[in-house]
Image (cartoon, helix red, strand yellow):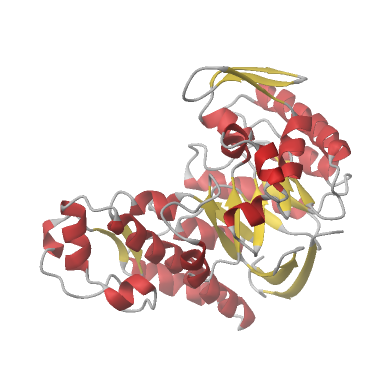
Amino acid sequence: MVIKYELLKKDPRTKARLGKITTPHSIIDTPCFMPVGTQATVKSLSKEEVEATGAQIILGNTYHLWLQPGHKLIEEAGGLHKFMNWDKSILTDSGGFQVFSLAKMRDIKEEGVTFKHHKNGSQLFLSPELAIEIQNSLGSDIMMSFDECPPYPATKEYMEKSVERTIRWAKRGFEHHKNKDTQGLFGIIQGGIYPDIRKHCCEELTKIDFDGFSIGGVSVGEPKEEQNLAIEYTIPYLPENKPRYLMGVGSPGAILDGVERGIDMFDCVLPTRIARHGTAMTSRGRLILKNACFEKDFTPLDQECDCYTCKNYTKAYLHHLIKAEELLVHRLISIHNIQFLENLMKGIREAIKNDNFLEFKKAFYEKYGLDNNDKDF
């Protein structure tokens, strides 16, 4: 297989695991967090700045890159790695979540999904085959199957039909994949909060020779408890020798919960999105830097952080930039937030290595100032 997973160690008291993923472009230590580069860029950051955070792999968005600038243009440029000047690993999603979250007036049929452009209203059509064709042109290391991302909540009857369609679409996409020697392909497990449906989806998709598996249908509005249940319903039926990816999850608490339950990979727009609104993640919790209390705070965002922002700037300066509506603040807080999550992943990996993951998690929660039930975590 083009994507190789090596299980290095299991935590003795949880399902947390330490490993390595080898792709055509790099080796990734897991558990890992992937910054999102929706349109061939991690918003406001250069390639060098993303690398400096410790990011080992980034995510590109199939739906958005299909619309602009177009997958054929990126293929002509030499693929997504060359186009955006990123020489480490890239994962691309399938576009299924964007059809669910952005598109207007969806019409889901066996052939695929007809929907309206989220900006100009023009009619679009995306099928399992086209989603794979686009990703083949992009040249990402890891591609995603095209799936239906059901709404939350969904009835069991709807979920059963949706999952059967997702299984059929996964088979069609796998057959259409033209670059099996250079690009990996993950299957996506759906099933909502129904354990028997998730089990069935796992059993059917693991019959296909996917390079790894993603847990879909989370981060769609469900409570934290249901997100954890979805993971617990899925993990027992996934092979140990392949990566496990929890899609769209990036808050520290959700990452820790996912790792504890056996997840290897995470992604989310959260660190850059909240940065653009002036919010920083720190070891002591989130800071809303527009607040007046930071006007004369001449200390770094986080005394425990060694990122570029914390080494060079103070909370008072960042507060000033927000008040002055200067774009630089988006970049500076984004650098910090991404490195905060990358440092969290390093700490998690070290804790698993040393058999003290639960102690690490408890200490992190206490310092962050939130508990297990906090929905903002």
**Image quadrant in which you'd find residue 123:** top right
Outermost residue, bottom direction? 354
Q: In the displayed structure, does residue 91 sit left or right of residue 151?
A: right
Give percent across and percent down for residue 365. 40, 67
| Viewer-side residue, 196 vs 360 | 360
Q: In this view, does 79 lie to the left or right of 218?
A: right
Q: Is residue 233 visible?
A: yes
Residue at image location 78% in from the left, 44% down from the top: 202
Name the residue at the front extreme: 76
Which of 267 and 9 lies nearest the eye of the viewer?
267
**Of 237 and 118, which appears nearest the observer?**
118
The quarter of the rendered structure image containing the C terminus is bottom left
Q: How many labels does the image show?
A: 0
> Where does residue 84 sit, x and y in percent of width and height?
58, 54
Tell me where residue 149 appears, x and y as whole percent: 63, 32
Residue 135 % position (x, y): 72, 42
Q: Picture quarter containing residue 113?
A: top right
Can see residue 152? Answer: no
